[in-house]
Image (cartoon, rainbow, N blue to C red):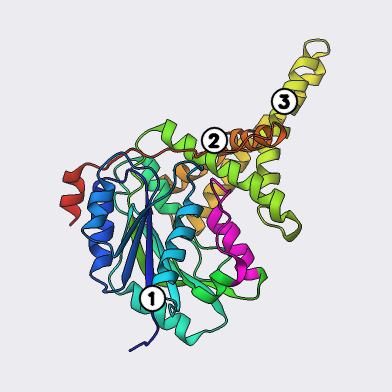
Amino acid sequence: MSGSTVGLVVIGRNEGDRLRVCLDALAKTGHVLCYVDSGSTDDSIAVAAKRATIVDELDASRPFTAARGRNRGFALLIDAHPDLDYVHVFDGDTEISDGWLETAIAHLDEHPDVGAVCGRRRERFPEASRYNQLCDMEWDTPIGEAGAFGGDALIRASAWTAVGGYDETLIAGEDPEFSHRIRQAGWGIQRLDADMTIHDANITTFRQWFTRARRAGHAYAEGASMHGEHGHYTREVRSIGFWAGAVPAAAAISGIAALKQPVAAVGVGVLAGYPVLWSRVRGHRVASGDSTDKASLYASSVVVGKFAEMSGMMLWAKNRITKTDSTLVEYKQAESPASELDRAA
């Protein structure tokens, strides 16, 4: 049995019953558990007080970010237990899978050159909406060496300390940015072929999905501005700029020109690139094992998502030009129906 010491950090904001499920599962592991809240107006603090070892609330005088919450949780754990070897971060809308923590700890014990490990995240209700289904497909990433982890991962405490933790100014993309610095410092990041967490996205409307994609675009633009010289998010930014910027602009210019010179209307044919993109993404997903229906849904989300992501990139650019601090871009509903969680229990 491993002799490594482990601490658990959970962050949340108005997660409702999802938080109870998260903390109940983690409390059973027997490891020290810290919950950090970001201005919840529900009963999150009371729920956490009955289950977590340490409960803290972020100072509302500064903008809330997930990065702030995770750094605060790490600091509180290290203050109370300076000998911690690893810290596992979780979002309050997840539930740890049986056996995951033991698998993750054993892997870091056996691989001192690895700074963090993550596993398979599964969506709790993938069939509840097409947007939940998309999240479930998004979590299905390759096993082995990984470029980044997400909001749930077991991180070596020495790696966390060495690179200075999360960047608290980021409103999104904080995990990939942190991962980038861990890799730059010489540690590897690996995704294991084991179930890690069950996630409850609870995205039921197009507006929620679009807002989530917009937040991703903000993260891509900001991440590329910080570490673009190392290729961090540069591919994503170029792709968004092409499909949601250059192609529509070329079509618009061609359309205007066609009013004076009809032959120029052929330029509108650039819009045919969207079906080509859709077909290419769909083909890749089918080849990866998705059903045709799922592959078509995913391909549609990629095409439409370019425009949502572009709006996020533009938001980041506007804030940078006007020297305005970015604030949280929230898309989640406040709480999942308790009946659904009860049925899953």
Marks 1 and 2: CB-CB under 8 Å? no
Q: Which structural element holds mark 1?
A: strand
Q: Nearer the viewer, mark 2 or mark 3?
A: 2
Q: Where does label 3 land, which residue?
A: 251
Quadrant occupied by the C terminus = bottom left
Seen as rendered, the residue at the extreme right is: 261
Q: Which structural element holds mark 2?
A: helix
Is 170 covered by the magenta stretch?
A: yes
Quadrant assignment, res 237? top right
Q: CA distance from mark 1 to mark 2?
A: 42 Å
Question: Residue 207: which numbered mark, if any?
Answer: none
Give the side of residue 270 with respect to residue 5, left or right: right
Residue 274 point in image, percent of width and height: 62, 36
Residue 334 point in image, percent of width and height: 31, 39
Q: Which amino acid lies under the numbered mark 1 shown in the image of this protein?
A: Val
N-terminal of the two: label 1 or label 3? 1
Question: Residue 304: which numbered mark, if any?
Answer: 2
Q: CA distance from mark 1 to mark 3?
A: 55 Å
Q: Residue at x 65, y 76 (%)?
A: 186
Q: Looking at the image, is 72 positioned above or below residue 293?
A: below
Q: Which amino acid lies under the numbered mark 2 shown in the image of this protein?
A: Val
Question: Residue 6: which numbered mark, if any?
Answer: 1
Q: Nearer the viewer, residue 137 or 205?
A: 205
Marks 1 and 3: CB-CB under 8 Å? no
* Part of the protein shown in magenta: 162-183
